Amino acid sequence: MVTNEANAAGVERETDPALARRFDQLAEQWIRERGGASIGVHDHPAYAEILAMGEAAIPLILRHLRERGWHWYRHLRELTGEDPVPAGEFDRRRIRELWLEWGEEHGWL
């Protein structure tokens, strides 16, 4: 289980502004170039660079998910090794809620 110990302890963790800007650039590029396609989107260089950010990307992804509702679920599963979504759940709104609840419970939001 991946836990942001600083936030879990009630301490606000600073996000590196340069990293946040780079994440935003990569997220926009990935979303723009992905379009509606589902094939090959995980081979995209922006996807790989976001994953390479490691745990530092988790709060950025969760904030983006909360604010924009984009489909970050595979990123989150790969970075955290967890999946709070029960098998057979396909309601995108519910999946989003479950990940945001997970982020709050684990101190990432």
Image (spheres, rainbow, N blue to C red):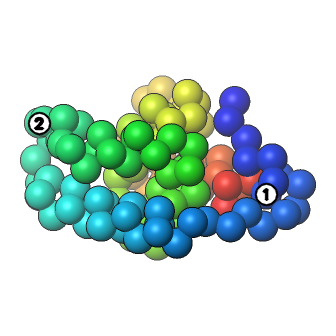
In the image, 22: left or right of 66? left
The three-letter amino acid code for the residue at tag 1 is: Asn
Q: Residue furthest right?
A: 9
- Residue 16, image x and y in percent? 57, 66
Contact, mark 2 vs mark 1 (Cβ under 8 Å) = no
Q: Which residue is mark 1?
A: 7
Q: Earlier in the sequence, mark 2 or mark 1?
A: 1
For label 1, count other residues whose C-alpha is less than 10 Å away and answer few (under 14), some (14-19) or many (20+): some
In the image, 103: left or right of 61? right
For label 2, count other residues whose C-alpha is less than 10 Å away and answer few (under 14), some (14-19) or many (20+): few
Foreground pick, 82 / 94: 82
The quarter of the image holding the C terminus is bottom right
Foreground pick, 52 / 69: 52
The three-letter amino acid code for the residue at tag 2 is: Ile
Q: Quadrant of residue 83?
A: top right
In the image, 43: left or right of 25? left
The numbered dot on residue 64 is: none
- Let me know if residue 69 appears in the view: no
Q: Under tag 2, what secondary structure?
A: loop
- Residue 39, image x and y in percent? 11, 36
Residue occupying the point 55% across, 28% down: 81
- Let me know if residue 41 appears in the view: yes
Mark closer to the observer (2, 1) = 1
Foreground pick, 51 / 98: 51
The numbered dot on residue 39 is: 2
The quarter of the image holding the N terminus is top right
Q: Under tag 1, what secondary structure?
A: helix
**Vertical comparison of 99 with 48: above or below:** below
Residues at marks 2 and 1, CA–CA distance in whole angstroms? 36 Å
Residue occupying the point 33% across, 45% down: 49
Residue occupying the point 73% across, 63% down: 13
- Residue 84, image x and y in percent? 59, 37
